[in-house]
């Protein structure tokens, strides 16, 4: 992303992790900033897990069912010590490439 603000994203499609792909695709939303995604996830999970502390984005692979290069969205919540897969995205926003190695963006709220 160069000198651009790491929290300023392109246009990323995100879908919640659900029981079936059809259910998951019904939740597709576009996000341009990671703060907007964090707000969405806090709204969904705050009663169970508290606020979002960190977001980890990891490449999963191509999914021909959705025609997405798919990335797992994993979140560390304040009430849980482990990361949870909460959804999937279709793009590499927040990812940085260093010599061909893709490293995830981790946001630290603390």
Image: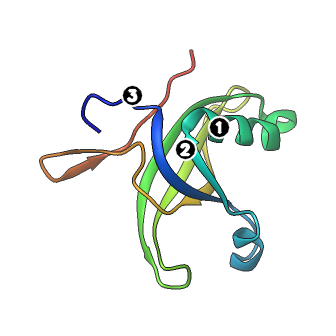
The residue indicated by pointer 2 is 32
- The answer to whether marks 2 and 3 mark residues whose Cβ atoms lie closer than 8 Å is no
Q: Quadrant of the C terminus?
A: top right
Identify the residue at horizontal 63%, vertical 41% (top origin).
37
Q: How many marks?
A: 3
Cα distance, mark 2 to mark 1?
7 Å
In this rendering, position of residue 47 left or right of residue 104: right
Which of 52/68 is in front?
Answer: 68
Cα distance, mark 1 to mark 3?
15 Å
Q: Quadrant of residue 2?
A: top left
Identify the residue at horizontal 63%, vertical 31% (top origin).
81
Identify the residue at horizontal 46%, vertical 42% (top origin).
9
Which of 25/59 is in front?
Answer: 25
Q: Secondary structure at mark 2?
A: strand
Instruction: Locate residue 6, reporting x and y percent.
Output: 40, 32
- The answer to whether marks 2 and 1 mark residues whose Cβ atoms lie closer than 8 Å is yes
* Residues packed near mark 2 inside 10 Å, few (<14), some (14 to 19) or many (20 plus): some
Instruction: Locate residue 20, reporting x and y percent.
Output: 73, 76
Furthest toward the left, the residue is 99
The residue indicated by pointer 3 is 5
Q: Secondary structure at mark 1?
A: helix
In this rendering, position of residue 94 left or right of residue 25: left
């Amino acid at each position: 992303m160069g000198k651009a603000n790491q929290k300023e994203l392109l246009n990323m499609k995100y879908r919640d992790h659900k029981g079936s792909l059809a259910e998951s695709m019904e939740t597709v939303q576009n996000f341009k900033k990671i703060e907007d995604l964090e707000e969405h996830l806090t709204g969904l999970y705050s009663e169970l897990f508290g606020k979002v502390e960190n977001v980890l984005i990891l490449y999963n692979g191509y999914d021909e069912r959705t025609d997405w290069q798919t990335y797992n969205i994993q979140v560390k919540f304040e009430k849980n010590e482990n990361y949870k897969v909460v959804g999937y995205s279709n793009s590499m926003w927040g990812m940085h490439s260093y010599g061909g190695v893709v490293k995830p963006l981790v946001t630290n709220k603390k």
